[in-house]
Image (spheres, helix red, strand yellow):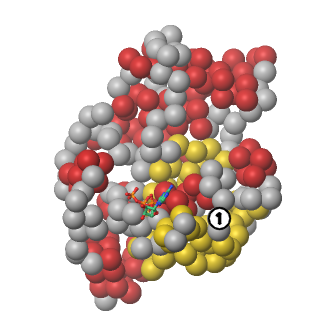
Amino acid sequence: MLIVECHELGRRFGAAVAVEGLSFSVAEGELFAFLGPNGAGKTTTLHMLTTMLEPTSGWARVAGFDVVRQAPAVRESIGVVFQEPALDERLNARENLEIHAVLYGLRGPRLKEAIAQALEWASLAEVAHRPVRTFSGGMKRRLELARALMHTPKILFLDEPTLGLDPQGRRHLWERIATLRGQGLTVFMTTHYLQEAEACDRVGIIDQGHLIALDTPAALKLKVLGKAEGSLEEVFLELTGRKLRDEEARPRDRLLGFARRGGEHTR
Ligand SMILES: Nc1ncnc2c1ncn2[C@@H]1O[C@H](COP(=O)(O)OP(=O)(O)OP(=O)(O)O)[C@@H](O)[C@H]1O
């Protein structure tokens, strides 16, 4: 079954085209990655698929529901972690989870059990009472992920999930993703880490709002480089060019550039 279907999906901001003519699908159970340079349209696409932003052309269905006409049904079927933390910093970890679970209709013993499971999953049971503002970036990310899974979504959307995580945090996250996939969850992520994209079933490369390639990492290498060896980084640079997209890089872009060169940072 196809869990994501897009047809000629597009989004304009005034005269500017952020995404245009996107047509692709994702099968249930896939680990799917969207790769692209800064400003390529990855987040805009994710926002449309998660009902945060209405498309200005084309259509998309997620879990069988239209993202515009059946937005509430889409929201019930998905878990989402965006780039910017969306936790209430004044509340503790348990309270943040509780608000989400109640919004999704969990009550009584099921609510208690879901919170306990989420805290355990995120390795945060011991600090459940601490206000989230005292958490590190990695702890917040784990909490957000655990929260996104509380209502047992069919598909998890992750916007650069490992940005800002240290190697331990990344590893923890990938172990969790592997477990979830074993349970049949579909994962749709955007990433700048080409190494992470290598681990995905299929990779879509988006540039200047257009999907320019979509296949398994092995098939992309064969098609673009003419050989099965080589790295996705070579594929990526071959397809998207080597020029910097923003000559005047914004702080976040500089950070991404740093991370791409193998650097680590803390929030
Ligand atoms: N609200 C908005 N108003 C105007 N332009 C926007 C808006 N949101 C995004 N854009 C533009 O749309 C284009 C795509 O942006 P988007 O954030 O989707 O790219 P991205 O691939 O996620 O980039 P990054 O890797 O930097 O996160 C960019 O040119 C961006 O400036």
Q: Quadrant of residue 257?
A: bottom left
Residue in the picture at 56% in, 51% down: 157
Horizontal side of residue 41 vs 167, given as left or right: right
Q: Quadrant of the C terminus?
A: top left
Question: Quick check: can you spot residue 251?
Answer: yes
Judge whether residue 259 can be spotted in this image. Answer: no
Q: Quadrant of the N terminus?
A: bottom right
Splitting the image into four quadrants, where does ligand 1 fall? bottom left
What kind of element bears circle 1?
loop
Is residue 191 shown above or below 224?
above
Give the percent coordinates (x, y) of residue 237. Answer: 27, 75
User: Where residue 139 sits in the image (x, y, percent)?
Assistant: 41, 28
Q: Along the line of sight, which residue is nearer the eye, 31 or 133?
A: 133
Give percent across and percent down for residue 212: 45, 80
Task: Tell me where residue 222 sits by quadrant.
Answer: bottom left
Left or right: residue 133 versus residue 249 is: right
| Residue 108 vs residue 140, the one in the foreground | 140
Q: Residue furthest top?
A: 129
Is the residue 49 above or below the residue 100 in the image? below
In percent of the image, x 74 and y 33: which residue is there?
104
Q: Residue at x 35, y 26 (%)?
A: 136
The foreground one among 79 and 45 is 45
Q: Quadrant of residue 168 in the image?
A: top left
Q: Which residue is mark 1?
A: 55
Q: Amino acid at mark 1?
A: Pro
Residue 140's place in the image compared with 91, above or below, is below
* Residue drawn where x is 68% and y is 45% of the image: 153
Crowd tier of the residue under label 1, counting other residues whose Cα lies within 10 Å: few below 14, some 14–19, many 20 or above: many
